[in-house]
Image: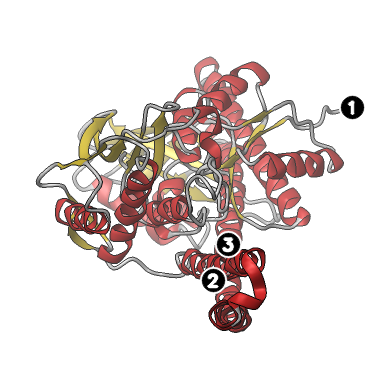
């Protein structure tokens, strides 16, 4: 009995990974492990030797899923199917360069998952069969004489060996001319083969051609002729049957076309879903804003006109209601901004990051002139991106740095650029409260905060927006920090960093 296919999952969202693991087990696959980062996935692939990898593109660590797939392509070829919620052209282009076996846009159905896995495994089997067929063919060529063909370029008379005659569907010893030879070529290929022969005969030169033979059966036979001049008027070459290889190539091509069609189909469905989601988001946000404004307004009226009747405790409770209403309004606005990022097309141009960062920091210092601050922005920082979106990246990162330095005697913030793996990356560094890197994976998820609302106010959306914008530009964002020792956020706006 054939063992079930071994599938390694690379997914840093534990709930998603667990659900996927359960679904695969129900479909009869063996899931030996789940990886959450690039390095861990490379290590587990060496340990478990999977038949296929389901790879999320945005994972923990310095490498994303596409970087890992590129490494595998070079060092340890394993079929990779991407699982992602992103379908930007820049992401698709990066992914396509790694020759993936599939690309599933989240959310996907169990049927789509199973079909894509089966197509990928079939494609892998075809590729392995193709490699094996080539190896066996090479052994045959080395071990046996191939069919031999010779031609006199003056008379166009051909002499073929017994094996060559058999391959060409001719009787051994039967006189053969170039015209007779071409008559046996499939009509679809005949004009091209004849043109190649004529071109190689005047003047004489080496040539190689693959073509189909006329056949009375449904099975198409493919022949390859390799020939070169042996004298002034004679050409000699070998004839071989390449039907197995050509049929495998055609089958593989059809599988690839099917995968490409599936990607295009799912991408189109995702775009339609995003349009519907955007319309729904605006509608819900509009309906929610009205009662929230009413709650906030009525709370303020009660505080202003009936404070004495409410007493100190009642006034405090109403003030908390008003504050929470404002916070709810801010969350709705933040969610809308986050949802818009999936549909906004970046308008790219050259952006002066140094000027943007200086303006944002100046505004922050004006709001708290009493705070001691040492801010440094490296000159000449430029990038190619959407000015509005890039400003949002800097605004969120710098406001976070300013906020988390509030309890320091002197606020220190630095904006600059440095090289990582030979590529320039931008950074925002602060001397704030920092955090334990064991919780770094939570930072870029909506509403996941490492500090309480009473300690540091905020919506918990800002870093999610930063990550989305970086991804829309083909870049990424990551962080290095230490508890009570500040944090450094790195980001790129293209796929080189």
Per the image, the residue denoted by label 1 is 1
Badge 1 element: loop
Is 275 situated above or below 43? below
Q: Tell me whether the residue at label 3 lies in contact with that at label 1, contact meaning CB atoms closer than 8 angstroms.
A: no
| Residue 125 in which image quadrant | top right
Q: Is residue 9 above or below residue 43?
A: below
33 left or right of 90 in image? right
Work out whether residue 469 or residue 111 is closer to the camera in this orientation and state it: 469
Q: CA distance from mark 3 to mark 2?
A: 42 Å
Which comes before the other along the chain, label 3 or label 1?
Answer: 1
Residue 238: percent from left, percent from top = 44, 32
Q: Secondary structure at mark 3?
A: helix
Cα–Cα span, label 3 and label 1? 33 Å
Q: Residue furthest front?
A: 308
Which is nearer the N-term, disc 3 or disc 2?
Answer: 3
Residue found at the very far left of the displayed protein: 379
- Helix, strand or loop under label 2: helix
274 to 187, vertically: above or below: below
**Residue 121, percent across and down?**
68, 39
- Disc number for residue 267: none
Decide if residue 113 is on the left or right side of residue 146. right
Residue 465 x, y percent position in the rendering: 44, 56
Q: Earlier in the sequence, mark 2 or mark 1?
A: 1
Looking at the image, which residue is at 51% across and 70% down? 336
Gap between marks 2 and 1, in whole Å?
Answer: 60 Å
Q: Label 2 belongs to which residue?
A: 329
What residue did someone put label 3 on? 261
In this picture, residue 354 sits left or right of residue 15: left
Residue 483 image point, x, y percent: 45, 27
Q: Is residue 137 visible?
A: no
């Amino acid at each position: 009995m054939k063992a079930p296919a071994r599938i390694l999952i690379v997914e840093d969202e534990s709930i998603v990974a667990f659900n996927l693991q359960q679904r695969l087990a129900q479909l009869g696959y063996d899931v030996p492990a789940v990886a959450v980062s690039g390095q861990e996935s490379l290590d587990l692939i060496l340990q478990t030797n999977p038949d296929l990898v389901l790879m999320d593109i945005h994972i923990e660590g310095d490498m994303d899923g596409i970087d890992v797939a590129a490494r595998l392509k070079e060092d340890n070829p394993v079929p990779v199917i991407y699982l992602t919620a992103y379908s930007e052209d820049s992401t698709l282009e990066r992914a396509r360069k790694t020759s993936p076996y599939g690309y599933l846009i989240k959310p996907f159905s169990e049927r789509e998952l199973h079909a894509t896995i089966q197509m990928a495994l079939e494609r892998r089997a075809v590729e392995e069969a193709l490699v094996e067929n080539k190896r066996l063919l090479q052994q045959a060529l080395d071990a046996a004489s191939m069919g031999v063909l010779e031609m006199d370029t003056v008379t166009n008379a051909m002499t073929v060996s017994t094996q060559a005659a058999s391959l060409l569907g001719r009787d051994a010893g039967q006189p053969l001319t170039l015209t007779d030879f071409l008559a046996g070529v499939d009509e679809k290929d005949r004009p091209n083969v004849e043109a190649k022969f004529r071109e190689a005969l005047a003047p004489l030169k080496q040539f190689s051609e693959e073509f189909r033979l006329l056949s009375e059966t449904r099975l198409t036979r493919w022949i390859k002729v390799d020939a070169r001049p042996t004298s002034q008027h004679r050409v000699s070459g070998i004839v071989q049957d390449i039907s197995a290889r050509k049929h495998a190539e055609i089958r593989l091509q059809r599988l690839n076309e099917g995968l490409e069609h599936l990607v295009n189909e799912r991408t189109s469905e995702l775009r339609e879903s995003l349009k519907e989601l955007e319309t729904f988001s605006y509608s819900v946000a509009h309906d929610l804003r009205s009662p929230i404004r009413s709650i906030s307004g009525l709370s303020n009226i009660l505080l202003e006109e009936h404070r004495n009747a409410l007493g100190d405790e009642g006034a405090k409770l109403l003030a908390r209601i008003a504050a929470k209403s404002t916070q709810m309004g801010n969350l709705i606005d933040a969610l809308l901004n986050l949802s818009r990022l999936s549909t906004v097309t970046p308008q790219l141009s050259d952006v002066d990051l140094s000027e943007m960062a200086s303006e944002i920091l100046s505004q922050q210092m004006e709001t708290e002139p009493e705070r001691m601050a040492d801010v440094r922005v490296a000159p000449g920082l430029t990038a190619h991106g959407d000015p509005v979106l890039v400003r949002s990246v800097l605004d969120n990162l710098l406001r976070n740095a300013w906020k988390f330095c509030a309890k320091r005697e002197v606020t220190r913030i630095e904006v600059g650029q440095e090289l990582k793996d030979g590529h320039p990356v931008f950074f925002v560094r602060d001397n704030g409260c920092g955090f334990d890197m064991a919780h770094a994976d939570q930072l870029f998820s909506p509403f996941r905060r490492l500090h309480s609302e009473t300690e540091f106010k905020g919506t918990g959306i800002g870093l999610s927006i930063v990550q989305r914008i970086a991804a829309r530009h083909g870049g990424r964002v990551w962080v290095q920090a230490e508890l009570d020792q500040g944090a450094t956020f790195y980001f790129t706006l293209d796929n080189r960093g």
